[in-house]
Amino acid sequence: MNLSFNYLYPSKDELIKIRKQIYHSEGSGFYIFKNFLPKNYVKHINKFWFDEAINDINIKKFKTKKEIFFGCPNYIYSSNTSNPNKNTIFYNFLWNNPSDQLTHDLSIQILILRNIIMSKSISNNFFEKSSQFQSTYRIVRTLNSENIVPFHKDWNSHPYIDPSALQATLFLSKNGKDYKGKGFSIENNKGKMQFFDTDLRNSIEEGDLMFWKYNNLHGISDKITSINSVGFTRMIFPVEILSKRGFIENIKKPLKLLYKKIIN
Ligand SMILES: [Fe+2]
């Protein structure tokens, strides 16, 4: 599949405009690349993850953050096991073979673009075995839920301190068409809350890519109700702090105890 994105290397003038909107004290704290991803690709991603991968029994279930270590597999998380379609998250790591090449390539391009906007090296937080921080990508769907992400700030306390830190959200569905509710909201750099829920305010469509300031208060606090089977879908690109103890290290202690029990 041949992908092309207009914004992979923004011009100098474009970068100034983007950074000003995100970081300036008068700025909104976010910047949206409208129609970043063509609609047919959006459709492909929704179909692949929520029609096909969701039924793949080979994807490991995500239980705890401790499971995120260098070389760990990709995971699926469902918030409610009796109703696995309620909230679903696919955790993906750059070191694994991609489940879907389009989603993987797209993610790498978005991560590079984020690093450029943040004035970091292009491969910042990519595959650095010595680093605790690793860029990842998640595909998330919310069908019906309330206050799924209470308002909070990120990257403002140890070990995550970086006032320049940005998160990216690639919207894969549209408020008012696929789901109802306030959806994602974020404060601007003066502390005023901004919403994207109606056409009267900022409108977000599927395929829009938003970079937003992690230090600004943000969340998804309202009630989300799905209008169709797509619901509220999006991709986010967290930088995870890795567990120093990988799988082997995690099972060493219980195995030692078991061994002691057996020989005693
Ligand atoms: Fe957050």
Image (cartoon, helix red, strand yellow):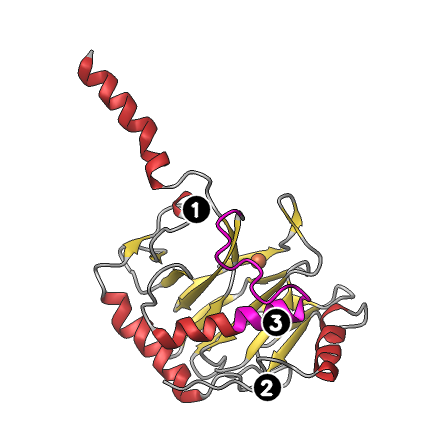
User: In the depicted view, which residue is nearer to us: 59 or 182?
Assistant: 59
State the SS at label 3.
strand
The x, y position of residue 53, in whole percent, is 28, 68
**x and y, in percent, of residue 98 in the image:** 34, 67
What predominant SS class does the magenta segment belong to? loop
Per the rendered image, the range of residues in magenta is: 110-130
SS at mark 2 in the image? loop
Mark nearer the N terminus (3 vs 2): 2
Foreground disc of the pair 2, 1: 1
* Residue found at x 63% / y 64%: 121
- The residue beneath circle 1 is 65
For disc 3, the neighbor class at 10 Å (few under 14, some 14 to 19, many from 20) is: many
Circles 3 and 2 in contact, beta carbons < 8 Å: no
Residue furthest to the left in view is 262
Check disc 2 and give the amino acid type.
Answer: Asp
Q: Amino acid at mark 1?
A: Lys
**In the rendered structure, which disc, 2 or 1, sits on the residue that comes first in sequence?**
1
The residue that disc 2 covers is: 199
Disc tally is 3
Mark closest to the chain's N terminus, 3 or 1:
1
Residue annotated with mark 3: 211
Is the C-beta of the residue carrying label 2 under 8 Å from the nearest atom of ligand 1?
Answer: no
CA–CA distance in space, label 2 to label 1: 37 Å
Q: On screen, 121 above or below 258? A: below
- The C terminus is located in which quarter? top left
Residue at image position (60%, 69%) is 114
Q: Is residue 123 magenta?
A: yes
Residue that appears at 48% across and 84% down: 37
Q: Look at the numbered disc 1 and give the secondary structure of its residue.
A: helix
